[in-house]
Amino acid sequence: MTAPLTYLIPWGYTVLLGLEGWRSPLLDNFFLFITEFGAEKFYIVLIAVMFWSISKPIARKLSFIYLTSSVVNLYLKTIFAIPRPADPLNDEILSQNGIISRLDPLADEMSGSFPSNHAQGSTVSWGYMACAFGKRWLLFLSIVMIVLIGFSRMYIGVHYPQDVLAGWLIGLVYLVVWLKLEKPVMLLRDRIPWLVQLAVVVLVPFGLCLIAPVPEVDKVLGAIAGLGAGYILEAVYVKFSEHGRVPVRILRSIVGLMLVFSVQIASKKILAYTSQALPEHWEALVVSLMYMLTGFVAVFIVPWLFTIIKLAHRDV
């Protein structure tokens, strides 16, 4: 192996074998549950519900800090090219270091191992929410969730400890830089016509996807384009209010999630049906468009429907 940091694999693998000895049905179920708090579906629910029913400004920023951090993570995975712990590509270096036992991971993961996006993404997202809301209880909960999500990736055998530690560190640096730049960037954005913003938020992600494609980045860049376009058009044409009575907010969230996941399921079925006939570069484009559609529906179509069926009123 010639990839950077491969010399850490034997140490990390030994740690994971030690954690595997702690396993029990109760802990297995607990950490498989915890790890889902760093998965795609959780962030779809979190960002959508926050946008529809809690705070539109915080939801917008949360979605972009998480998604742009994920883009960075995917490029880092490609640069370092460290195989997952259970990947047979590790067998040679493990054998050379006298490690005979092999892990039995509790989940299958296909992307690169270093750094952990669950650790990095939870640090930027939970960390940003703690800073944005300024509540002590949320700060405490955020720290607990960041630690548990990162540890869960080691417990279930899909990340080395160095992946998780790097994810936490990169996420923390990314969060600090974001918080420093957030205000001046927002001021700059407000001086740019919304049509120009719309062009940038759609063209830049798709341009990056075409110029520098890496595994899985088409999904994230498509989501950035869809959410960005939806946020801009919602602010111009819909202007719905996320406030209201608690039962209405709950109903709003239930209805909205049903619509968003229906669109996502339908899109995946269409992709599965058409992927066999598509060249590889066209398939990546279709995946990007699917995620763009899902994001756009969540933050423009669904809020517009809320105003139509009287689940939300428009801000004057």
Image (spheres, helix red, strand yellow):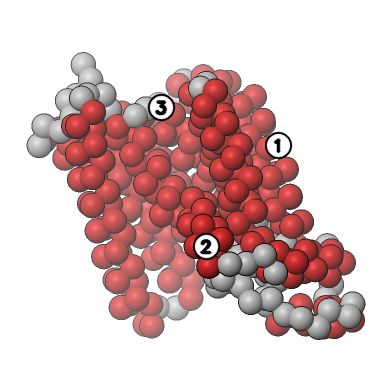
Name the residue: 15% across, 33% down: 311
Residue 274 position in % (x across, y down): 33, 77
Q: Secondary structure at mark 3?
A: helix
Crowd band around label 3 with a 10 angstrom C-alpha radius: few (<14), some (14–19), many (20+) = few
CA gap between label 1 and label 2 equals 34 Å
The quarter holding residue 102 reads bottom right
Question: Quadrant location of the C terminus?
Answer: top left
- Secondary element type, mark 2: helix
For the residues labelled 3 and 1, the Cα–Cα distance comes to: 22 Å
Q: Which residue is mark 2?
A: 26
Determine crowd level at label 2: few under 14, some 14-19, many 20+ residues with C-alpha closer than 10 A. Answer: few
Say which quarter of the image contains residue 170.
top right
Q: Which mark is residue 57?
A: 3
Instruction: Say what secondary structure mark 1 lies in.
Output: helix
Residue 178 against residue 216 in the figure, above or below: above
Front residue of 61/149: it is: 149
- Along the polypeptide, which appears first: circle 3 or circle 1? 3
Q: Which mark is residue 173?
A: 1
Q: Is residue 283 above or below residue 51?
A: below
